[in-house]
Amino acid sequence: MKHRNSHLLVGYWSRLRKGHTVPDQTDIDPRAIKRILPYVFILDASDAERPLYRLAGTAHCERYGGELKGTQFLARWEFQSRTALGAVLQQALMIQQPVCISSLAASDEWGMVEVETVLLPLCFGAPVPSRFIGISQLLGDYSAICGKPLTFERLVSSRFVQDSGDLPASDLPPPPSASVRNAGRAPHLRLVVSRDEAPAVRSDIDPSLQRLMEALEIAPLKPVRSAS
């Protein structure tokens, strides 16, 4: 992996596992990845050959020209790349390992840039992973495409990531302890038992953070007032 943010997300994913092979999606604390949140996305890969965006950060959406939720992750890739990536994603879920994807991307009218995408398997209330949390970063000079949205992408290489070389844990904070979560000045989160529908989130938080919390089926709790 070449981009620092790729290392940061892999390091956070590794710490979330807590002895398990793959973390559950509901273990993710958006506050812990707030610095890279605009570039983060989540894929539903129940069908690994047709993965769908459940959510994408604002910077990631802008890079590809609009809201991506509900669209196909592989839609912009050339045909041979789609076929190869479908197999890679299936294998990543099977061996439960992150995968780093290198690609060349272009807009409709301008030059090409190198892109690094890292996808990390997630479970979702089941022992078998069926989703990915990912991040996509430009490695070249963005001015080469004059700020135009990317509409085409071609696979250059893919490789599975070993987490032994991650950045130190101090680079991203660990999930907050129970005492921090219960402090009156911090956001309060609870897991929603029902997975049929993402609850509405009403809280004084950053819009990107709110959208990620909605996708993770996390709702804010009001601070508990002690009896006088």
Image (cartoon, rainbow, N blue to C red):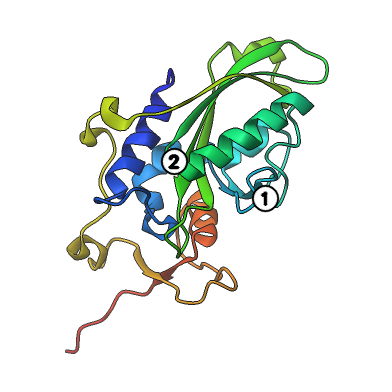
Tell me residue 185's x, y (percent): 27, 62
User: Badge 1: how crowded within 10 Å, few (<14), some, or many (20+)?
Assistant: some
How far apart in space, not on screen, are marks 1 and 2 (Cα)?
27 Å
Q: Does 167 sit above or below residue 128?
A: above
In the picture, the quarter occupied by the C terminus is bottom left
Asked whether, in this view, residue 105 is left or right of residue 44, the answer is right
Task: Look at the image and tell me whether residue 78 can be seen.
Answer: no
Q: Which residue is mark 2?
A: 95
User: Badge 2: how crowded within 10 Å, few (<14), some, or many (20+)?
Assistant: few
Q: Does 122 sit above or below residue 84?
A: below
Label 1 vs 2, first from the N-terminus? 1
Q: Viewer-proximal residue, 192 or 72?
A: 72
Residue at disc 2, secondary structure: helix
* Mark number, residue 134: none
Give me the residue at 29% from left, 28% from top.
166
Q: Amino acid at mark 1?
A: Lys
Asked whether, in this view, residue 107 is left or right of residue 41, the answer is right
Tell me residue 17's x, y (percent): 30, 49
Tell me residue 213's x, y (percent): 48, 58
Q: Viewer-proximal residue, 173 or 120?
A: 120
Between circles 1 and 2, the one closer to the viewer is 2
Q: Viewer-proximal residue, 80 or 166?
A: 80
Residue at disc 1, secondary structure: loop
Asked whether, in this view, residue 181 is left or right of residue 77, the answer is left
- Do the numbered discs 1 and 2 sit on residues whose CB atoms are within 8 Å? no
Q: Amino acid at mark 2?
A: Ile
In the picture, the quarter occupied by the N terminus is top left
Q: Which residue is mark 1?
A: 69
Give me the residue at 31% from left, 74% from top.
223
